[in-house]
Amino acid sequence: ITDPMGFILKANKRLLTLTETNLEDLTGTHVGEHIYSDDYNALADIWVRMQVETDFDSAITEFRILAPRGAKWYRGAIKASRNDDLTLASLIVHFADVDSKFAAQQALDRSSRKFGNLLDSLPDPIVRLNRAYEIQFANPAAKEFRRLDPTGKWPQVLVEDQEMYLSEADHCWTTGETRTLEHRILAGDQVLWCETTFVAEVGPSNKVETMLVFWRDQTSRRRHEELLAHRALHDSLTGLPNRARFAELLELAIARQATAAELGQVRPLAVMFLDLDRFKIVNDSLGHLAGDELLQGVSSRLSGTVRPGDVIGRLGGDEFTILAEDITPEDALVMAERIQERLKHPFRLNGREFLVSASIGVVRAESPQQSADLMRWADSAMYRAKSLGRCRVVTYEEVLAPDVLDQLDVDQLIRTAIDRNELTLHYQPEVILDSGQIAGAEALLRWHHPIKGLLGADQFIPVAEENGSIVKIGAWVLRRACEDAMSWDAAGLLDDQFILRVNLSPRQLDEDGLPGVVGEILESTGLPPARLCLEVTETALMREVEHALEVLNELAALGISLAIDDFGTGYSSLSSLKRFPIDVLKIDRSFISGMTEESRDSAIVRTVIALSDTLGLVPTAEGVETEEQRQILKEMGCPRGQGYLFSVPLPADDFREILRGSSELTAQPVGQ
C-alpha cells in the first residue's frame, strides 16, 4: 500500500521475501526505487491519472521488480482508495508473477524475428492471409511482385482456375494440410502461370487462423513445355498438325460422331490423303530449300481451300491429310476436286514456275470407325489414284471394287478385321447322295467389311496368301470352326458320322509348326480328332512334295482325316498320290458342271471315282447344282456331294437350325 505519491506505507511478507528486506527498511521508500526504470513510466502514468480522474479507480499493467536475485516480470492490479471528497487517499497494488509467460513470449518474439528474416530473404513472393483473404504480411519479394493486386486482396486468379484454387485453399483451411497447385493469374493483359502453396498457421485455439501463401512464377517453364508439346505435335516446316496430332484430332472427331450416333443423329466425316505428284523432281532439280518452299506453298493453298474448322495435317515428305466433319459424301468429293484445281495453278520457285498436281484418296464414313482404319483406307485410295496415272481423286469404295481389291493392304485389314470380330464362317453341308442325310460341313470364310459389306474368300484370301497373313487367318478359322462344331455337338445335333471340313492354304502347309497349331486347337476346343478333316488343294501338295508329305504325316498322326480339294485341276501323279496319307478326294466343280454336256468331263469324273475306290479313298463331288447331276453321280458310285442343290453356305446359327430341323436335305436349296 502506498500513499498518493507512491511512497510505501505497508507490504506483505511475499513482497518482503521478494525484495529480501524487512518492513522497517521498505517503509517510506518510493515504489520507483524497486521498479525497473524502463517500466516505471507506465506505472507512473496510472498514478497520475488516478489523481486527476476521480472515476479512474483501477488498472492493470506489467513491469519488472528489482531484486537481489535479478529482475522478474509481474502483473500489477492497482486499486485507488479515495477520501470522502474523492481525493486520492492511497493505492493498493496486488502483484502476480508472470515471468515465465514473458520468457516464452520473448522466445516466440525471437523466433518470429528469425522466421520473418527468413521470409524476407526468400526470392519467392510470400504473404500471410486471413480468412477474408486479406494480406496481413508480405515479404519484400511479394511487395515487388507485379502480379500482387494493389488493393491488398489475393491475386486475380483466372476465372477458369478459380474453382480449383479455392478448393485447394478451403482444404487447407479445413484440414490444416499443406496444398500445392499450378494455376493461371492475370497480370495486366498477360496470363501467367503460378505455382501456389498453402501452409496453414494454427492459433492458440488449435484452429487454422491464418495461412501462408507461397508463390513461384512458372510461366517460363510452362511456356517452354507448351513449345515442346507444340513441336512434338506439329510439323516444323508448315506448322500443320503432324501425324500424331492429326490422329488425336481424328479420334476426337470419331468420338463426336459416336456421341451423335447414340442420339440417333448422323455426323458423316471424310479423311483425305494427298500426295504430291513428282515432288522428287523439284527437290532434285532445285534443291531441298525450294522443295521446302513448295511444301509451304501447298500448305497455304490447302488452308485457303478447305472450310473453316477442317483439319489439315502433314505426315511427312510430300504427304498431307485432311479431316472434314459434317460433310456429305458428295461434298467431300467436291472438296477434293476443288483442291486439285487450286493446286494446278503454277508455283513460283527460284524465279521459275512449276506446275504441281496431287493424287488424293478419300474415305467417307457415316458411322464411327477406327481411326487407324480410316487412315489406312484413305492411304490405299491415294495409292490407287497414283497407280491410275496420278492427278486423280479416288474414293475407298472404288478401291474395294473386285478388280482392284488385290491392291489393298490386306494384311493390316485382316488383322483389324479379326480384332473387331468382322470375320465370320459360313457352313455348306456335305450330304450322302442316296439319302440326303447330312454327313458333314465345310467351313467357308466370309468378311463383314465395314464399308463394302460381306466379302467372299476369293476377294481377299489370294492377297492374304501372298503376304503371309493367311497363317493367322487360317488358325482363327480352324479354332472358330471347332468351337462351332462343339456347340452343335453339345446340343445333341451331330451324329457319329459328322465330319467338319476346314481348308488349309498353301502358305499354312509351308509352316513347320502347323501340326502343333492343329493339335493345340483340338485340345483347347475339345473337338475329337476323328471329327476333323483338313482339305489341301492338289496344287499345294505338288509345290514341295517332300515337305508336304512330312507335314501331312504329322497331321494324320493326330487322328484327323485329310482330303485333296479341287482334285483334277493339278498335276499330281499316281505315284505321289499313293504316298500321301489321304482319306478323301474332292472332285472339282468344273468337272461336275460339265459332265452332263461334255463326255470328257463325265469320263474324268468316272475315272476319279474309280481311282478313289482303288486307293481306298472316299470320293466327294463339289458344286452339285441339279438333280440330274446328283443322279449321274449316284449311278457312277459317288457316295457324297455338296452344292447349291442342297444348300448355299449358311451362317452358323442358320446351319444349326438345319441340324435341329432334319438330318436329311431334299433336292431343294435351303438358302440363297
Image (spheres, helix red, strand yellow):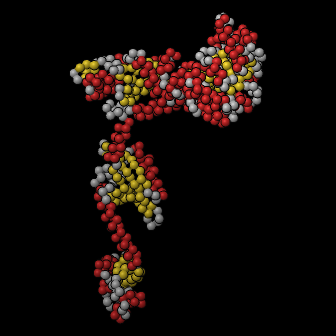
Q: Residue furthest bottom?
A: 24
Identify the residue shown where x is 25% and y is 19%. Answer: 353
Identify the residue shown where x is 35% and y is 28%. Answer: 317
Q: With respect to residue 27, does 637 lie above or below? A: above
Q: With respect to residue 665, does 48 lie above or below? A: below
Residue 623: quadrant of the picture = top right
Give the image location of residue 115, x and y in percent.
Answer: 34, 65
Query: Quick check: 66 left or right of 531?
Result: left
Q: In which quarter of the image is the C terminus?
A: top right
Give the image location of residue 509, x and y in percent.
Answer: 58, 27
Q: Residue furthest front?
A: 575
Give the image location of residue 437, x and y in percent.
Answer: 76, 19
Q: Can residue 206 be seen in this view?
A: yes
Given residues 413 and 9, the one toward you in this image is 413
Identify the residue shown where x is 32% and y is 19%. Answer: 356
Query: Quick check: 650 left or right of 322?
Result: right
Q: Which residue lies furthest to the left in this view?
A: 351
How many numbered discs sit on the rendered protein?
A: 0
